[in-house]
Amino acid sequence: MALTDTAIKKAKFENKQYKMSDEKGMYLLVQKSGKYFRLDYRFAGKRRTYAIGVYPQVSLKEAREERDKAKKLLARGIDPNEYKKNKKIALIEGTENSFKAIATEWFTKFSPQWAESHSSKKWRRLELYIFPFIGNKPIKNITSTDLLEILRKMENRGILETVKRTRNVCSEVFQYAIASELLSIDPSEGIKKALAPAKPKHMATITEPKAIGELLRAIDSYSGSYTVQCALKLTPLVFVRPGELRQAEWTEIDFDKAQWKIPAEKMKANREHIVPLSKQAIQILKEIQPYTGQWTYVFPSTNGKHRPMSNATITSALRRMDYSKEEMTAHGFRAMASTLLHESGLFDSAVIEMQLAHVERNKVKASYNHAKYLEKRTVMMQWWADYLDKLKNELPQ
């Protein structure tokens, strides 16, 4: 049961301390010395307690707001106690107006309004590319040259789209500082024309396990159409080409055999292809069936239920989740599966390649493989789905 102001006022210490529970893990600790808002949480596998404040100096409303800020930090893999300690150090050292301190203040203020996937990527760019170089520098002393030097190093690595997005997030911090009367001009504004234009990187993918887990959590938090979210969830589990996914029809799905049989005319190699469906894939299909099962296509277009969704839908959804062209593409899920399945060493290359429906020039051999590897592919697809679940459920350290 949630706390109320009346209940807190009436709470009195008797023979020993006790807790009064509130929502989302927060509680009031009643001791002889006073009443304290606390939040218990786990970080890096250890149980910890976050001291929110003392009642009545901190009201119930303010305590809940502070609790929610701490929860946001935990979601991004940041220990709220460490975060609070670093803010105190900044005040003691006189660096409270450093770029990192102002960025932290800006992020804390505005990130609750953003999707978690969007906010985590903004913060990650600052952590990776900006804080190590100018994080502790007073924001008023940062020049266009300072920022350009950092972004030029990024350009040399070929991550041009990330350069653009990193400059944009820096500009948001500088604009916040201007509004807070800590700065008079935005040093990131004058360097736009000095940066190389972003060029799309074909078949961009993510193969680092921790980043894959982050992507899968972002998909789970996707705030767009439910149909598109289901398509996003299914894509990494089946790693077919985007055109094959969007044109999937309900008549091709065999729930009893747990298979999706794609007709030859829809395949690049012009031959029938079977996708063994993991338990996770079956669950997604059963969840969306009540919404689209009356139509031909599993993922119909929003502009006409008798047409499949647009070829750009998955790509647009990734961009909405703040994944750039250089980071991830709809085709990238195939490359992701291919890379990690080969690296696992658990499955023959021929089995992996057959499931990816890569063209086999020898048609006789292709027919033979199609029959021989189906059972092994079924095992592999379930292993892959379980592996993705493991990555998704691993909390950031």
Image (cartoon, rainbow, N blue to C red):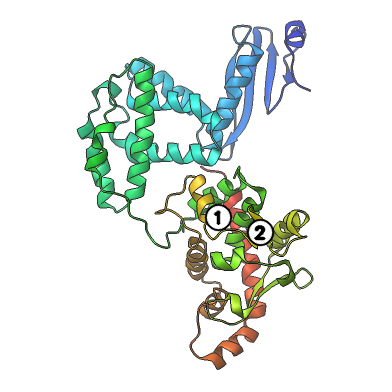
Q: Residue at x 61, y 49 (%)?
A: 393
Q: Which mark is residue 11?
A: none
Q: Does residue 236 appear left or right of residue 132 in this picture?
A: right
Q: Amino acid at mark 2?
A: Phe
Secondary structure beneath dot 2 equals: loop
Q: Which residue is mark 2?
A: 299
The image shows residue 118 at horizontal and vertical percentages of: 50, 40
In primary-sequence order, the first of circles 1 and 2 is 2
Judge left or right: residue 109 versus residue 287: left
Q: Position of residue 100 (x, y in %)?
A: 36, 28
The residue indicated by pointer 1 is 313
**Local crowd at mark 2 within 10 Å, few (<14), some, or many (≥20)?**
many
**144 versus 301 height, above or below:** above
Q: Is the C-beta separation of discs 1 and 2 under 8 Å?
A: yes
Q: Hey, which quadrant is residue 5 in on the image? A: top right
> Residue 241 occupies which quadrant of the picture?
bottom right
Q: Is residue 371 left or right of residue 78?
A: right
Does residue 238 appear in this view?
no
Estimate the x, y position of residue 19 in percent, counting from the top left: 73, 19
